[in-house]
Image: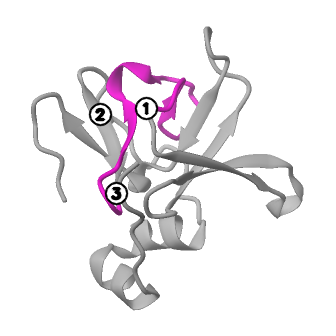
């Protein structure tokens, strides 16, 4: 893992658009089906806040849940128990900058059986061969 990124709330607000700030810094959730058409294929999905590699494009699948879904993380992911909203879930955060990304559920496709259900505003797609934005 790269060095941990720590910024003040004011700095995050200046760097991020309001929707990305709400989801990643305040553990919000975007509306389902608000990010159609995320690419699937060669490339990687990185954290919208810090650019850390989170998922490879070939792990993306259509779960019909309304959010981008992945069957395996590529790295830089931390899991935390989430007891909010009267449920027991596993929250997924960026290990590098602590951005809230979404949740992981045990109802995904083989071989992992996992479904990383990720807010679209929390990630960016970087095509294979392209430079990851800083």
What are the residue bounds of the magenta stretch?
49-74
Q: How many angstroms separate mark 1 from mark 3 (CA)?
A: 15 Å
**What residue does disc 3 label?**
48
Label of residue 74 in the image: 1
SS for dot 3? loop
Q: Is residue 72 part of the magenta span, yes or no?
A: yes
Q: Is residue 65 visible?
A: no
Q: Position of residue 25 (x, y in %)?
A: 51, 72
SS for dot 2? strand
SS for dot 1? loop
Q: Which residue is painted at 51% across and 32% down in the image?
A: 69
Q: Position of residue 128 (x, y in %)?
A: 16, 28
| Left or right of 92 on screen, residue 58 | left
Q: Considering only order in the chain, which callout, 1 or 2, is on the residue closer to the N terminus?
A: 2
| Closer to the eye: label 1 or 3 | 1
| Left or right of 123 on screen, residue 101 | right
Q: How many angstroms separate mark 2 from mark 1 (CA)?
A: 9 Å
Q: Which residue is painted at 40% across and 56% down in the image?
A: 121
Q: Is residue 53 part of the magenta span, yes or no?
A: yes
**What residue does disc 2 label?**
44
Tag 2–tag 1 contact (CB < 8 Å): yes
Label of residue 89 in the image: none
| Closer to the eye: label 2 or 1 | 1
Q: Position of residue 122 (x, y in %)?
A: 42, 55
């Amino acid at each position: 893992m790269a060095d941990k990124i720590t910024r003040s709330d004011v700095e995050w607000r200046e760097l991020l658009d309001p929707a990305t700030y709400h989801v990643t810094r305040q553990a919000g959730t975007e509306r389902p089906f608000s990010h159609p058409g995320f690419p699937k294929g060669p490339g990687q999905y990185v954290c919208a806040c810090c650019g850390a590699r989170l998922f490879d494009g070939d792990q993306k699948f259509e779960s019909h849940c309304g959010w981008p879904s992945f069957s395996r993380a590529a790295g830089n992911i931390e899991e935390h128990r989430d007891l909010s909203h009267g449920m027991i879930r596993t929250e997924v955060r960026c290990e590098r900058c602590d951005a809230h990304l979404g949740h992981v559920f045990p109802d995904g496709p083989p071989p992992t059986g996992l479904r990383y259900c990720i807010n679209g505003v929390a990630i960016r797609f970087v095509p294979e061969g392209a430079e990851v934005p800083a």
